[in-house]
Amino acid sequence: MPLLWPIVIKPPKLLRKLPLLRNVWRANGAFSIPLLGRAGSRREWFVLIPVSAYAMVGMFGAALALAKVHWPAAVALGTGLINGLIGLLAAA
């Protein structure tokens, strides 16, 4: 996928012939930096799994921090709504 999609900046024809640049900046405007080899390789998976786990732990920590801050207000709101419904049902 091009770096600035939907704007496609293709490399100049002179630069397309340079060996290093040819592998990084494709003729269709996409950038490709093969740091870990082929897509789907074992090396890629060995990096992908710990990075994904780290991201999930961070997201869980952020959600827990938000829950600690907003939980009392959510419980108060829920209690108020339930008490209001009970009051309406009792009055009817």
Image (cartoon, rainbow, N blue to C red):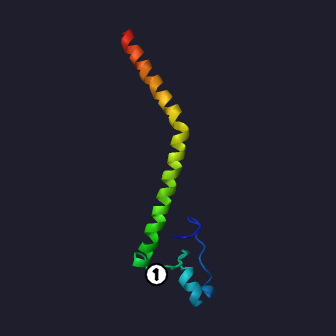
Residue at figure coordinates x 56%, y 64% from the top left = 6
Placement of 41 over or under 74, stated as above or below: below
Q: Local crowd at mark 1 within 10 Å, few (<14), some, or many (≥20)?
A: few
Judging depth in this view, the residue of 28 and 71 nearest the camera is 71
Quadrant of the image containing the C terminus = top left
Q: Is residue 17 visible?
A: no
Q: Residue 74's spot in the image, x, y percent?
A: 49, 33
Residue at 53% in and 32% down: 73
* Residue 81, x across and y down, in percent: 45, 24
Compared with 48, 71 (above or below) is above
**Residue 88, image x and y in percent?**
40, 14
Residue 46 image position (x, y, % from top left): 43, 74
Identified at 49% across, 28% down, the residue is 77
Image side of residue 13 versus residue 58, left or right? right
**What is the three-letter code of the residue carrying label 1?**
Gly
| Residue labelled with disc 1 | 37
Under tag 1, what secondary structure? loop
- Observer-nearest residue: 24 or 52? 52
Q: Looking at the image, is 55 positioned above or below residue 26?
A: above
Q: How many marks?
A: 1
In this view, 27 is above or below 18: above
Q: Is residue 66 left or right of residue 92?
A: right
* Residue 1 visible in the current orientation: yes
